[in-house]
Amino acid sequence: MSVSVGIMGVVALMGLESYRGAISIKNLFGRINALANLQNDMMNDIEQMQKLLHEINEITEKEFHKISRNSSEYKNKGSTKPKTIQPKKPKVLSPKPSSSPSASRPVRVDKSLHYSDAVTEELIRTAIDRSYVEVFLQPIVRLPHRRVVMLEVFARLGVGNGQTLSASEYMKIAKEKNLQVHLDNLLLQQSLEAIKEDSKDEEDNKKPLSYMLNIEESTLKNLPFMKDLLTFLQSNRALAGRLVFEITQTSFQGMKQESLEIIKSLAQLGCGVSMDQVETPHIDREFMRDIGVRYIKIAAARLAGFSTSDEGIRMMNRIKESLSEDGVSVIADKIEDEPTLFELLDLEIDYGQGYLFGKPENKRFQKPSFKILKKSA
């Protein structure tokens, strides 16, 4: 009996040691995997550093050419162009390949670019100094025919390497540094340039398009700029009839009477006025008539809520009838696919906008020949 117990004890000890050994091996593999993951993270960091250094070299090269062109050495037009400085690739120490299975996994590269506030401000000021922003146009279509009748104009800042910063990425800094009015001025100039180029199509019996652009509340409050704009449009009535100024419903709320008067003056000159980001179509009709609102823009997801019942459809139809009496049309935006559009068909919405009809596309124009802003912001 005692012998059996002894044997069982020895077996138990052997099993315990094997268990401990297994745990040690498991921990070892865990450490190996952790090191492999760390190696992948380091490779990601190295690639990001390479990308950043490449962008810095591009910016440096552009500034070099700018300085060279302005220097006395190249005043003579017949002189040889400055030799292009090729950016040197940074030397990067590649980690030694690991034999662990996890090391063979593809390296994740974060393609999103994040700039500090100081760099973003410099990009904004550079765009203003060069009097140029990247312009993107997105179609607005008549429903249900899907015929393009308007183009919304978006401004983005070029950062090199074919990449841009959208308004959501630079707007905060632009407002903080009081640079928004200059960007709105540039966007308006590019819109006028687009209208001028588009007018050539009128000879081909094509109906001219309108151009819708967003104006920030900070710009509306800048009375010198707005007065300059009114003066310019008064002398260019044909252009005024092709512009639609878009202002958010939030901006309209609590707006000072001075700004409201300017909006009314824009409408009297023939410009369209659109109320953006409308939360509900139940809006003060007298207020809209007074300031000359021609369009209200509501997200497709909000409008779809009316189409879920017969009562909702009848309610939306009544609202649309009252809006039509005042010359106001409804634009459903953020229509990204066919099912979303299908939900809106019973509501007989006037216009649609979204990726289903076309994503914003970059449009390059010549340097604007129009100059609107004469006074400093």
Image (spheres, rainbow, N blue to C red):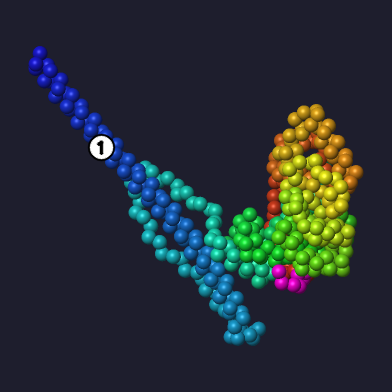
Question: For numbered disc 1, what is the local secondary structure?
Answer: helix
Graded by Cα atoms within 10 Å as few (under 14), some (14 to 19) or many (20 or more), the crowding at tag 1 reads few
Q: Residue placed at 58% from the left, 85% from the top? A: 73
Is 59 placed left or right of 149 in the picture? left
Q: Position of residue 60 (x, y in %)?
A: 53, 71
For residue 157, say whether it is visible: no
**Residue at 47% in and 57% down:** 48
Question: Which residue sits at x=58%, y=75%?
Answer: 65
Q: Position of residue 25 (x, y in %)?
A: 26, 37
Magenta highlight range: 371-377
Q: Quadrant of residue 197?
A: bottom right
Residue at the outermost right position: 325
Quadrant in the picture for the N terminus: top left
- Which quarter of the rendered picture does the C terminus lie within? bottom right
Q: Is residue 374 magenta?
A: yes
Q: Can residue 233 be seen?
A: yes
Label 1 amino acid?
Ser
Residue 328 left/right relative to 6: right
In the image, residue 186 above or below residue 260:
below
Pick whichever, 183 or 38, lies toward us. 183
Quarter of the rendering containing residue 182: bottom right
Residue 230 appears at what percent x and percent y? 83, 65
Q: What residue does disc 1 label?
A: 24
Main secondary structure of the magenta stretch: loop
Q: Residue at x 40, y 61 (%)?
A: 92
Give the side of residue 210 with respect to residue 74, left or right.
Answer: right
